[in-house]
């Protein structure tokens, strides 16, 4: 059956999920491409994750994006996982294939790096050490992307040093686990600082991090896009650092999901960005 002859169904799975602007973006693309379908926010409790994933094919979904807190746990329910996602240890996109099998990929690293390069073309990962806050699925993608771009040292800060160490054991000696109480000392000499946690997101407490020791030529990025500018980004920009929010990361990974689900590559345009920004400002 041709793609324009059936109702296309996709969505995003997370807990919570109603803050997500993925439905707005993907439904914009469906309309823009004159396709009959819908992209839905799917609030799935962790205890019900397996049932939700197993039901995708029966419900007619082409696939789903995966967000906090399911990116790692969902892997055990998939039939096949892309080698890059296996290397990251997290999945951000699932394709429900016509044969009934489930295939997992991770598009987060691509979206993260593409977003930074789009907003800061002069940025270079190998300019100096990076400091990444967090050790969950988002942090895994960020670290993978930075390593692929040539960063030689990532200072990985997490409340659980054991979780940071586990990521270091998987990714190699470039990852240097840092205890939470030492997070501000890790900023000395840092050229790229990334918040890869949910701290600072709407409804969550802010990330507590003084930037006194951060060089002023360091780039500060956040994978959060709601709000458009987190407190971390605001503080960084006030002191002269360049700040990169997470909205571009969302936009730039979207086309990869569409290629997997529908065989179509939608466009990331100023119109799309303005639509998302307006929604977030409201």
Image: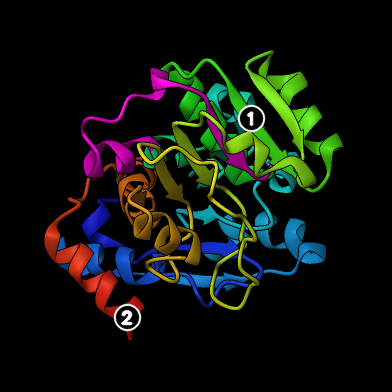
Front-most of 257 and 205? 205
Q: Which residue is mark 2?
A: 281
Q: Could you say where residue 168 lies in the image, as x and y percent from the top left?
A: 73, 23
Q: Which residue is mark 1?
A: 155
Examine the structure image and report whether residue 119 is included in the region drawn in magenta. Answer: yes
**Which residue is at a point 35% across and 41% down the rendered structure image?**
256
- Horizontally, residue 115 falls left or right of residue 159, namely left
- Horizontally, residue 231 falls left or right of residue 273, namely right
What is the distance, in whole Å, between disc 1 and disc 2 at their CAs? 33 Å
- Image quadrant where residue 253 sits: top left
Q: Could you say where residue 205 lies in the image, as x and y percent from the top left?
A: 65, 72
Residue 189 seen by the camera: yes
Q: Quadrant of the C terminus?
A: bottom left
| Tag nearer the camera, 1 or 2 | 1
Range covered by the magenta-colored residues: 113-135
**Which residue is at a point 47% across and 19% down the rendered structure image?**
151
Examine the structure image and report whether residue 208 is included in the region drawn in magenta. Answer: no
Residue 180, disc: none
Q: Which residue reaches farthest front?
A: 212
SS state under label 2:
helix
Front-most of 14 and 181? 181
SS state under label 1:
strand
Residue 34 seen by the camera: no
Q: Could you say where residue 51 lies in the image, as x and y percent from the top left?
A: 75, 61
Q: Residues within 10 Å of mark 1 (few under 14, many from 20)?
A: many
């Amino acid at each position: 059956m041709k793609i324009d002859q059936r109702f296309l169904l996709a969505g995003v799975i997370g807990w919570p999920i109603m803050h997500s602007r993925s439905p707005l973006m993907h439904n914009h693309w469906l309309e823009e491409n004159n396709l009959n379908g819908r992209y839905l926010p799917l609030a799935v409790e962790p205890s019900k994750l397996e049932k939700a994933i197993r039901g995708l094919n029966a419900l007619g979904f082409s696939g789903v994006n995966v967000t906090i807190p399911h990116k790692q746990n969902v892997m055990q329910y998939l039939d096949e996982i892309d080698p890059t996602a296996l290397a990251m240890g997290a999945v951000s996109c699932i394709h429900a294939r016509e044969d009934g099998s489930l295939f997992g990929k991770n598009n987060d690293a691509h979206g993260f790096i593409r977003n930074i390069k789009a907003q800061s073309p002069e940025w270079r990962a190998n300019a100096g050490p990076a400091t990444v806050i967090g050790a969950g699925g988002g942090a895994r993608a960020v670290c993978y992307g930075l390593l692929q771009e040539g960063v030689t040292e990532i200072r990985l800060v997490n409340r659980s040093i054991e979780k940071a160490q586990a990521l270091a054991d998987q990714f190699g000696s470039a990852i240097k686990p840092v205890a939470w109480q030492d997070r501000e000392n890790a900023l000395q000499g840092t050229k790229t600082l990334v918040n890869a946690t949910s701290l600072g997101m709407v409804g969550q407490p802010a990330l507590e991090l003084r930037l006194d020791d951060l060089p002023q030529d360091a780039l500060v990025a956040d994978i959060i896009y709601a709000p458009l500018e987190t407190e971390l980004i605001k503080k960084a920009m006030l002191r002269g650092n360049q700040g990169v929010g997470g909205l571009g990361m969302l936009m730039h990974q979207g086309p990869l999901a569409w290629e997997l689900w529908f065989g179509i590559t939608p466009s990331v345009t100023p119109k799309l960005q303005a639509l998302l920004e307006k929604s977030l400002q409201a």
